[in-house]
Amino acid sequence: MNCCELTRTRASASGSIVLASAKRLRRRALPGLSMLAGALAIAGALLEVGPAVAGEPQRPATRLTTDGQLKSDPVFIAGGEKIVFTLQETFNQLSLMQLRLSDGQLERFRPGVNSSHYAASFSADERRFAYLENDGNLHVKLVIHDAERAVNLAEYNPGGGFAGVRYLTMAPDASGLVFAFPERGVAQQLFWLSIDGQQRRVLTESDGFDACPRYSPDGRRLAFASTRDGNFDIFVMDLAGGPVRRLTDHEGFDSRPAWSPDGRRLVYTSLRDGNYDLFVINADGSGEQRLTWHEERDDFAWWHPNGRQVVAVCERDGQHDLYLLDAPP
Amino acid sequence: MKSLIEGDGGNLPENTPVPVSRRALLRAGAAVPLGGVLARGEARAASRAAAQATIFVWLWGAPSHLDTFDPKPGAPTAYRGPFASIATRTPGVHFTELLPRLASRSDRFSLVRSNVTFDGAHPPAGTLGMCGYAEGPGSEPPSFGSIVARQRGDGELPPYIMLGRGVPRDVVRPAKGYGGGDWGQAYDPFLIGCDERGQVNIPALKLAADLTPQRLADRRSLMADLDRWRLQLDEAQFERWDRAQQRAFTMLTSPRSLRALDLSLESPRTRQTYGQTSFGQSLLLARRLAEAGVPYIHVNWSEYVEAWTPNTDFGWDTHIHNFDLLPNRHCPIFDRAFAALLDDLHDRGLIASTLVVCMGEFGRTPKINNRAARDHWPQCYFSLWAGAGIKPGRVVGASDKLGEHPITRPIAPPDVGVTIMDRMGVDSVARAEWNVLRDAEVIHELL
């Protein structure tokens, strides 16, 4: 671990700062490794750790969780006050969790769902959201939920037998959503689905794997990852039509794009240097910048609504936690 | 401090020595047969064996060979998959980009690319992979671990330990070939669970209601219990416990055994290196058990093969989501943990006496299925070998340009078994006497 010769612990996002030695923090931050058993140990405090990112000592990362369990797909909601993410809650269960940043309170986001459910996506007003649910043997369906009425609007079943919806993104205006599904040969396409789950149309028809779609904040563009040109790279398409634009061109795996709130940039994951790291690129493909250099994994990034930070799942000392990183200006 | 070991809900404070040894218990007058569960008369000297221990890493569910250790970048789109190939430390040898740590350590192990098996369904292929024989209506041969257990005999720790949540199975049934088979329950593995925090769970304890680790760790209650047991636990009653319960009791009265199970005795740095996953911490526990003299440790990636099925634990059976689960979850966990095991064995000087074998029960279809994933493929797959005289940095065997079939001598499960036996000192005389693995060939190219 290269983090923290000195570590700051703060009682709340806006609270007072307390200094603690790195050793003391390590004991607190690694409950699993000190044999504290049992349930999640999300700290009541947010831990600001610096420098957590090698090569960027001037840019401390804030550790938001401390249980170290496998995580993925964090998204901000409530104006950045909360994060919904996927947690490997038990050895056989993925669950959507909701973390309140003001006090570190962590709770199940969908407490009534008892099978693995993950990868939530929200409309801009957060009145609608969708997620994926493992509802049978090698079978994953898509669930669309009305948060106001607390009812499921629709469930999209991809078919009988082994079949699974992959990835999803809900349109900001909640008119529908886009998901990935392999329906034709060895390729995987992107599909648009109406919010009631009744209408569906194919959006992409490449011979590659199209994955990880993300609506732009204005709902007019879609960023996604695709192997249409050989290996996973980042692409953007205008939903009103026009050519698909390729943003990255590396031999390594580039995936999981996420839009900045102003729609001008994307953060994404790349494996180009033999490790999962985060990069930022302008939506026109220019100005690529590297965000992380750590020797362990940095992945699943999502922009904070303030546009100045991203949350990501960072592996540090073998633990997977949510960290808040400063985005390049 | 919460418990190190979970049994019947009991707790064992970390680093707490259990105050009464098995010998002391016997001296105390409890007339119970706590000697080795296995007959020592059959234990054979292992001093001349290349390996004192085998760590058998079982990637249950079957990882794709093309997406891991046998990429085919020149194959048509319908075969090659979306992952790039990367160079390894071995000149001319490439893995996929999902295994960067192991690529940088390819000089620490050897790779077989020409494994084959004879059944395309998980439980029977699992039986083949673990014992070298097909399931059938007749006899049930013993597993590799059971053969080693018979050769080495019992010690303070069971000679054949399986780390995992349960014996390997799919949602329908277990694989038969994990244990003693016709040799009986005495040669079954002793099952120990290890979670992502390194907390150890011994299922057998749940069956012995009185024997909680907490009670054993509490000296006063233990002495009281011993007095009570001495009165109550006559030989007949002890014999009513099954072998696993007897072993659990024997083990928990041995401080040395308890130390072997206590991952808190490792440095935080070491524990972190393996990663906070059940698989990673299980590999670390396997190293500790090998160090403590357990001759055969089988580490399960998962109990169930299924990758996406409610109540199963994310096996490698990726009929769907293969190209999602591998980069997002499975390969990063595996790459980190297995690389850590290799490094740790090297750093501690254990690699010369510890055989490491890593494989699944088969490969996955080179041709991508219509769900953009891969199905079962017993005709060709991979295995990894290290330690105990295995020459590192080699690639043994080769598959054809699509990864469908070996173009060199196929390496079948009995060959895997005989090679393990060769390293563990179970010679052809013993195998003939026990009528196991008689017609197979050592993978000499590894040596």
Image: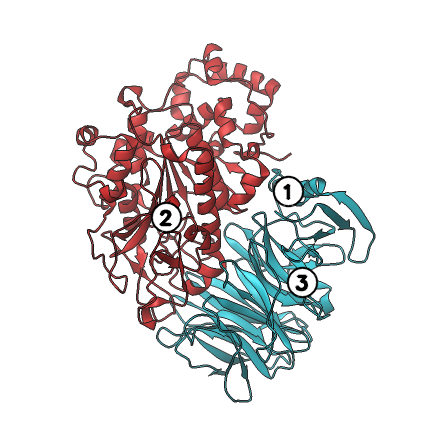
Q: Cα distance, mark 2 to mark 3?
A: 37 Å
Placement of the N terminus of chain B among the 4 image quadrants: top right
Residue type at numbered disc 3:
Ile
User: Which disc, if any, is residue B169?
Assistant: 2
Residue drawn at x 64%, y 42% is A31
Residue drawn at x 32%, y 64% is B72
**Residue linked to disc 3:** A83
Q: Cα distance, mark 1 to mark 3?
A: 22 Å
User: Which disc, if any, is residue A187?
Assistant: none
Instruction: From the viewer's side, name the closer residue of B87 and A14.
Output: B87
Name the chain under label 2. B
Q: Colour of chain A?
A: cyan
Helix, strand or loop at mark 3: strand
Is A311 rendered above or below residue B431?
below
Residue type at numbered disc 2:
Arg
Is B82 rendered above or below residue A319?
below
Q: Colour of chain B?
A: red
Instruction: From the viewer's side, name the closer residue of B379 and B167.
Output: B379
**Residue linked to disc 1:** A31
